[in-house]
Image (spheres, rainbow, N blue to C red):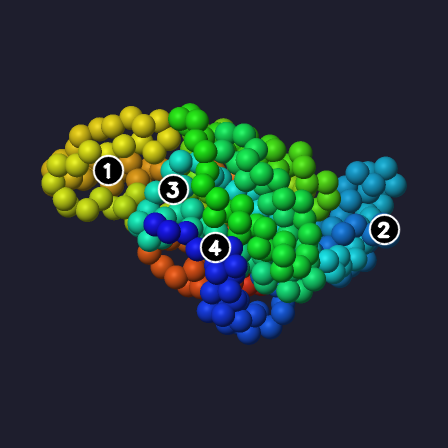
Amino acid sequence: MVSPSPEQLLNRLEWKVVRRLDGLLQGDHRTLFYGSGLDFSDLRDYQPDDDVRHIDWNVTARMDAPHVRQYVEDREITAWFLIDRSPSMDFGHQERPKNLVVAELVTTIARLLTGGGNRVGALLWNNGIETIREPRSGRNQVLLLARDLLAEATHDGEVTRLDGLIEAGASRIPRRSLVFVISDFLTPPGWEQHLAMLAQRHEVVAVRVVDEREVALPDAGVMVLEDAETGEQLVVDTANPDFRHRFRAEVAEREATLQAAMTRSGVDLHDATTGEPVIDALVRMINRRRSLVGARRGGA
């Protein structure tokens, strides 16, 4: 695969994707991405029509009377992308592997946000920090992010620890931000608690990038499968019904485990696949985010 240049990638996405999404969002990026978008301002006595979720229980106990927190809207969004650059992210169609899907997603979302004057930054991770791009606004910042993502990653042959990425991001994001955690989530357990802690402080959106062959093997006879991260190889017969059944069962178990972990963390999970245009994944995310935000407000 010959990767496009950052300028080529951004120009293509601006023409084919960003303009269409801008029309769909009509500039309302906060509704899609940032939930309530509120910062703490003051405390006051509770009134009967107040949102009970804003009650400050510590102050209420001390004052022996219910008090609520008041918030003001933070008009500027600061967004961070925490990006998994592990070897498994190189997998996928020759013309469009997972890492190119990530580049398209991040470049598009970053361009949408910077177009509204917001700042975007990124932390690229591969069992260690590859690159930190501090948040800035403007088209040049988006080009720098695209350049970082299109650069070839270096790999150490170790299994990726996603908890390290989340910890590194949490330690470097000083104020409430919009945080995208982008990965295939093919990683050992142990990251869930870190994600939940991150979500207590920030608005967190998880995006899983998937290739269909990771969830449904083709019936192609005897094949050699290689673990992208460790290099371990295994000869399998994909035409064997028992093997295909075990594979489907393992995929279902992995999916159930991931969904349960996201639920415990209080984070929404969105999917993007190598076999679909990036605009389809983003429109699906928009519609789901709107539905979730509407449900939260309706349940207030």
> In which quadrant is the C terminus drawn?
bottom right
Q: Nearer the viewer, mark 3 or mark 1?
A: 3
Q: Residue at x 48, y 55 (%)?
A: 5
Q: Is residue 106 visible?
A: no
In this view, the residue in front, 215 or 14, is 14
- Residue 146 drawn at (x, y percent): 53, 52
Which mark, by number, is residue 193?
none
User: Could you give the CA–CA distance between mark 3 and mark 4, rounded to whole angstroms?
Assistant: 18 Å
User: Could you give the CA–CA distance between mark 3 and mark 1, rounded to whole angstroms?
Assistant: 21 Å
- Residue 77 drawn at (x, y percent): 69, 56
Check the image and report above or below for 139 versus 191: below
Q: Is residue 233 left or right of residue 1?
A: left
Which residue is identified by label 3?
90
Q: Is residue 126 visible?
A: yes
- Residue 232 drawn at (x, y percent): 29, 26
User: Could you give the CA–CA distance between mark 2 and mark 3, rounded to whole angstroms?
Assistant: 48 Å
Which mark, by number, is residue 247?
1
Secondary structure at badge 3 equals helix
User: Can you tell which quarter of the image residue 284 is in?
Assistant: bottom left
Q: Reading the chain from its start, which is encountered first: label 4 or label 1?
A: 4
Instruction: Name the residue type under label 2.
Output: Asp
